[in-house]
Amino acid sequence: MAHSRWIVVFAALAVLSPTPSSAAPAAGGVDWRQFHGHPGHRGFNPLEQQVGAGNVSSLGLTWIGNGATVGDDLVFKSSPTVVNGFVYFGTDRGQLLAFRDSCASSECDPVWRVDLGEAIYNTPALVGGILYVGTASPLGKLYAFDVKACRRGSCTPLWTGNVGVGESSPTVANGVVYVGSQFGGLYAFSAAGCLRATCDPLWVGQTGGDVNNSPAVSGGSVYVGGSDKKLYAFDATGCGHATCAPTWVGPVSAPIYSSSPAVSRGVVYVASFDASPNSFLYAFDAAGCGDAVCDPIWKGTGGHYLDSSPAVAYGSLYIGSGDGTLLVYPAKGCGHANCAPSWIGQAAGPVATMESAPMVANGVVYVGENNNRVYAFPAHGCGRSVCDQMWEFITQDPLVNSSPVMVNGTLFLTGTNFGSVPELYVFELPAR
């Protein structure tokens, strides 16, 4: 959080086909196992059927998960992970919280929690019964927990890896956990651990800047953005050495901070953070270009301090901007080097930066804005260049920068009660 970009962010306050490791059906419905639901980070739940464009306006707050502890605490960027009837996220004071996904009253406490002692600014990943989450600081770690053991009251880590994890959410794919370091580098660990309490990475990908976004894995490659104005692509299996160079890099106009790459149909999308007109959405060929340095296929214009992570669904790409609008582009581009949004989503009321990662389900786009609000927009647009929200909720959190999650007819959103109590907001349709 020490980047100069936060000065700009706070100033702005004024003015899938599912796979076993993503949104795969569980006994109780659909799971959302890691940031943006899938190793490719498309942010799309294609299996939602209960809540859609026709009834989303009826969503109501049904209960709140209360993560209060001794002293003030807050949620920053850690989005809900929903697996097999439980919801997981982390807090600034280092709490890893686990709630049931349903509650019989208006407020419920966590079913378990563990204090990791350092800030959690990333979204946990839970695959194969093991939960992975990182902590921030030079002494930060990647932790692996057995969630069944935690529910029994024994929440000792299975193993840890020494890496300072800021906002980079662990991504699990093909038996490997990938995570970026806020001090530079992409780290790849064996998801199964190493039979020791502390595990070394399988390999580390070299980057020229810090990595505060979540790695995207698709087609045998892993992609991360660097603060040194580059998108990096690595072979997902490594290079046979402890340290690996990228297979190619894509230069961009400004640092890539929290914007996590998303991969869909052979294209990788990511955004750079700068003032308009120098902040862009970029689309690169995921296979590279045959050279060490690759230019984008096309760029999306119209952005202002883009720090949101793109979502891809229905042939469109959705991303929040620093001017408080949801920008929507055709995912295949516009046939030119520079593409303007095909439409934007803009809500009535106060305008603030929209750094929340949009999430798409059943014709609806859900996104938070740093003006206390979470919105729903029509994913297919409204036939005009500017579309109004179909639904909104005013939270008690001035910075709604986590990514909403809609699964099984329930919308989950993490946040903070007036900057002091971590909360899980849970929305559902009225009971029939």
Image (spheres, rainbow, N blue to C red):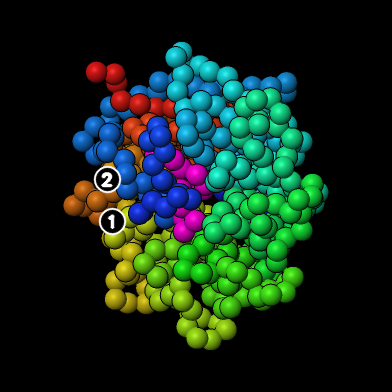
Q: In the figure, 251 relative to 191: above or below?
A: below
- x, y (%) of residue 154? 71, 29
Is residue 220 visible in this depiction of the protein? yes
Query: Circle 2 — which element?
Result: loop
Q: Which range of residues does the magenta coloring cover?
A: 30-41
Query: Circle 1 — which element?
Result: loop
- x, y (%) of residue 131? 61, 42
Q: Which residue lies furthest to the left in this view?
A: 383
- Residue to which mark 1 is pinned: 314
Residue situated in front as seen by the camera: 176 or 120 = 176
345 lies left or right of 416 = left
Residue appearing at x 32%, y 77% in the figure: 336
Residue situated in front as seen by the camera: 117 or 29 = 29
The image's mark for residue 400 is none
Mark 2 is on which residue type? Gly
Residue appearing at x 30%, y 63% in the figure: 330
Mark 1 is on which residue type? Tyr
Crowd around label 2: few <14 · some 14–19 · many ≥20 (10 Å): many
CB under 8 Å between callouts 2 and 1?
Answer: yes
Q: Could you tell which of marks 2 and 1 lies nearer the N-terminus?
A: 1
- Residue to which mark 2 is pinned: 363
Q: Residue furthest front?
A: 195
- Is residue 398 on the magenta stretch? no
- x, y (%) of residue 307? 52, 54
Q: Residue furthest bottom?
A: 291
Residue appearing at x 33%, y 61% in the figure: 329
Is residue 411 visible in this depiction of the protein? no
